[in-house]
Image (cartoon, rainbow, N blue to C red):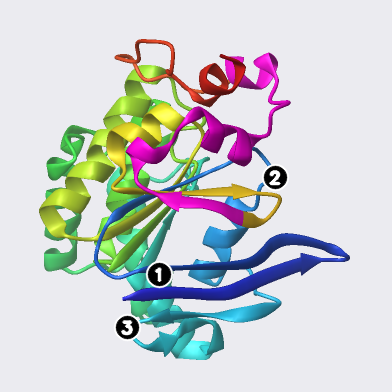
Amino acid sequence: MLQVNAVTRMFGQKAAVDRASFTIDRPAFVGVIGRSGAGKSTLLRIMNRLTDASMGEILFEGRNVLALDGKAKRIWQSQCAMIFQQFNLVPRMDVASNVLHGILNRRSTLATMFSLWSEAEITRALGILDRLGISEQAPKRAEALSGGQQQRVAIARALMQDPKVILADEPIASLDPMNAQLVMDTLRRIHDEDGRMVIANLHTLDTARRYCDRVIGMRDGRIVFDGTPDQLSTGVARDIYGADASFNEAATSTALPTDTGPDRDYADLILS
């Protein structure tokens, strides 16, 4: 279904992504983990075509999406929705309009300029917000919402595209533990109920274990682990994060409210 073949992205002499290869043969919930600078975000941006690859190919249902341009590229970006760490909403725009903006690239310039939405489009946007438990926020400005609510609006905007793939780039990194859990529960429910492929960059091992069917570990641009959550041993954690992972980095990681035990996050594993 999705094949990533030797994808590389060079910035000068440095490879941000270095010959990354993996195959996802069914809609799954896949976590990508690694330290800051490991190449996780660059990989997702390449998949969505926000960043160009230096070499390699990405095949989705047999088509190389890295070769697409113009209208074909925009169609792919609609099928492969992106959710960002900082939400990327229009702060002064109401929530419903932010969600409707998920289908901007399917509309005429005139309709976009004058915010002309059909009744069916508005009804669908409100239905998605209701599904995510934030329909009462529809008339409010996005900037008036909490971080967790804003991220769920961003997820609703992605769902408005009716994508086949959802890419989430550190979706809970800027959230408190309770909102982090709400967002991750939402993404997992979308996968389970809709059968959509979800690929999420995550910061902690515990989150990957709890929500993912499969985990890909990156270090220095390379994939160093590809397996199931129960294979995330101490040795694997050292391969992914390095034996020198600092306590300070661990202290900034997001721990979900029900985290307990000595393996709450990656640093606990590495430092144990």
Q: Nearer the viewer, residue 238 or 211?
A: 238
Q: Which mark is residue 61?
A: 3
| Residue range (magenta) | 223-251
Identify the residue at image location x=34%, y=24%.
Answer: 179
Where on the picture, by quarter, is residue 232? Answer: top left
Q: Is residue 262 above or below residue 37?
A: above
Disc 3 to disc 1, C-alpha distance? 11 Å
Q: Secondary structure at mark 3?
A: loop
Q: Tags 1 and 2 in contact by the CB under 8 Å rule?
A: no
Q: Would you name the residue on which mark 1 appears?
A: 23
Q: Would you name the residue on which mark 2 appears?
A: 37
Looking at the image, is mark 3 or mark 1 nearer the viewer?
Answer: 1
Q: Nearer the viewer, residue 218 or 134?
A: 218
Which residue type carries mark 3? Glu
Which residue type carries mark 1? Thr
Magenta span includes 182 = no
Disc 3 packing (10 Å; few <14; some 14–19; many ≥20): few
In the picture, measured across the screen, residue 232 lies left or right of residue 97, that is right
